[in-house]
Image: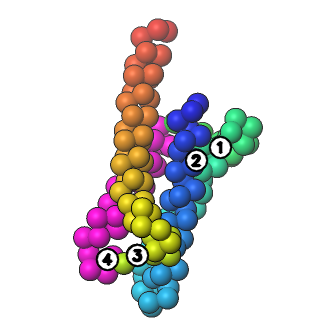
Amino acid sequence: MAAESFVSGVCVWIFLWVSADSVHFANVGEFGRCAISVVHLPLVLGLLLACLSESGREVWRRCSCFKWSWFRALVKVYLGLIMIPRSAKFNPALRFDNAIERMCEPFGLLGHVIVVLMVSLGLLQLVYCVFAGMLSCCCK
């Protein structure tokens, strides 16, 4: 599925962005925020591995809850929603540019793009799961 491979590319950017934020929080001594960021890295990595090519996807999905498309959809929505405060810089502690954002000016919009892509793709996948479930019940 093309959308799944697209999501794996977005997950690479999320992984890099969250890792850069974790390094920033560790450098300024905010170890609580650093721990919160680091805790989300395995979830991003799991979604990345579940959305890989067909061979990689099958190996990963056999041994995890990422084999269910509704779970992957919920993870996408969750990751998108939890990144809203960081991308919008609501809190003064979140008003910083990490190493990736400082590298190039357009990367300053990376958070906004990630939020929009993950929430919209997750919601679309949830809608698909609901309709696919309804069709499978009706067609029995």
CB atoms of marks 1 and 2 within 8 Å: yes
In front of the other: label 3 or label 1? 3
Q: Quickly name the residue at label 3.
A: 97
Instruction: List x then y, in percent, for residue 2.
Output: 57, 33
Q: CA distance from mark 2 to mark 4?
A: 27 Å
Residue type highlighted by circle 2: Ser
Q: Quickly name the residue at label 4.
A: 95
Upstream in the sequence, badge 3 or badge 2? 2
SS class, disc 2: helix
Q: Residue at x 57, y 56 (%)?
A: 12
Q: Quickly name the residue at label 1.
A: 52
- Could you classify mark 4 by the number of other residues whose Cα lies within 10 Å: few (under 14), some (14-19), or many (20 or more)? few
Question: Magenta segment, which residues?
Answer: 70-94
Residue type highlighted by circle 1: Leu
The answer to whether any part of residue 95 appears in the image is yes
Q: CA distance from mark 3 to mark 1?
A: 29 Å
Q: CA distance from mark 1 to mark 4?
A: 33 Å
Q: CA distance from mark 3 to mark 2?
A: 24 Å
Please say if 104 is above or below 125: below
Q: Quickly name the residue at label 2.
A: 8
99 or 74, which lies in front? 99
Q: CA distance from mark 1 to mark 2?
A: 6 Å
**Rendered image quadrant of residue 95:** bottom left
Asked whether residue 100 is drawn in magenta, I would say no
Residue type highlighted by circle 4: Arg
Instruction: List x then y, in percent, for residue 43.
Output: 54, 58
Upstream in the sequence, badge 3 or badge 1? 1
SS class, disc 1: loop
Upstream in the sequence, badge 1 or badge 4? 1
Residue type highlighted by circle 3: Asp
Please say if 121 is above or below 29: above
